Amino acid sequence: MISKNFKSLIKQWKEKLDVSKTTKKNYLCQVEKFFKTYEELSPKSVEDFLIDGRLKRVYVRRFALKKFVEFLSKEGVVDWKDYEEVFKKVKYKLKERRDIATLTYDQLVLLIKKIKDKKLKVILMVAFDTGARIRAILRLKNREVNVYNDKKIELYLREKGERTFLRMITPETYKHLKKFLSSKRKYVFFEKDLIGEEDLEKEYYELWKKLRKESRRILGFEVSFHWVRRSAGVYWYEKTGRDMKAVQDFYGHTNPTVTAKYLKLSGERIKKLMEKERRPW
């Protein structure tokens, strides 16, 4: 059993984590959330909480907790073997995961049409068209928006791991985006010309809070940015005749195998279809 002196344990882990990395920072936030809720609910054991916590609307990634328990095991606080079987029991039905992770195209259109915040509205449009993460969209510079004709508009996006992608957006999305473009500014969504990770994170969480509030008002439930990214993938999966390779390339997921060479070729299908796309917003 893990001691209830969680704060000191989390502090030890934090010192060993490179929290400048977004993924690891998210792990830490989720673990802190888990233990805060654990103390409030006071279940009989960690196992009880892991298995039943979701019924109490506590959604914490199992992987984040696993990383933390692995750290405690290395530090000699707990024995990993005691928890290995526990983690295997924490499962969500596929249908449940799909329901809470994506939006239908109609739901997304309704959400975008009725959102009042103009910046949030256009960021969601770009996110759906490109499948990009929100932080990559926030990093977008004015000179990285390339307009070739009224059907081909490309954005130069910098994703996780400093990878870069050219992604197309529809003319309807560009109509809204160009209202934010200015030759006097360096970034599309920031007034100042020099931004750091702190500025990026602050803007991200402000928009995230607005999205939660607006989606609750419009759809009756809270939506995250990742739902939009997932929804874009589902949309193109159906649109391309369930071409998984095309969608993998659309997302920009890396794959070290030879199969990755074919993803770029399959991804051209989305580029061709994008030229014919029209949005109702």
Image (cartoon, rainbow, N blue to C red):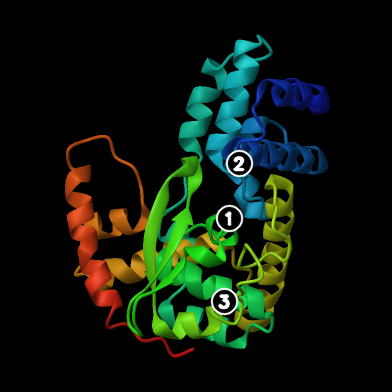
The residue under label 2 is which amino acid type?
A: Thr
Residue 138 seen from this side: yes
Which residue corresponds to the image point at 48% horizontal and 36% vertical from the top-left?
89
Dot 1 or dot 3: first in sequence order is 3
Q: Is residue 251 left or right of residue 265?
A: right
User: Which residue is identified by label 2?
Assistant: 22
Q: Residue furthest top?
A: 76
The residue under label 3 is which amino acid type?
A: Val
Residue 149 position, x and y percent, is 34, 81
Which residue corresponds to the image point at 82% horizontal and 28% vertical from the top-left?
7
Mark 1–mark 3 distance (CA, rounded to whole Å): 14 Å
Question: In the rendered image, which quarter is residue 231 located in?
Answer: bottom left
The residue under label 1 is which amino acid type?
A: Arg
As rendered, which of 184 and 87 lies closer to the eye? 184
Dot 2 or dot 3: first in sequence order is 2
As rendered, which of 252 and 96 lies closer to the eye? 252
Q: Residue furthest front?
A: 184
Which residue corresponds to the image point at 75% horizontal and 20% vertical from the top-left?
12
- Do callouts 2 and 3 mark residues in contact (Cβ within 8 Å)? no
As rendered, which of 243 and 123 lies closer to the eye? 123
Disc number at residue 135? 1
Label 2: element kind:
helix
Label 1: element kind:
helix
Residue 237 position, x and y percent, is 28, 66
Which residue corresponds to the image point at 17% horizontal and 49% vertical from the top-left?
262
User: Which residue is identified by label 3?
Assistant: 122
- Do callouts 1 and 2 mark residues in contact (Cβ within 8 Å)? yes
Residue 102 seen from this side: no
Count numbered badges in the picture. Answer: 3
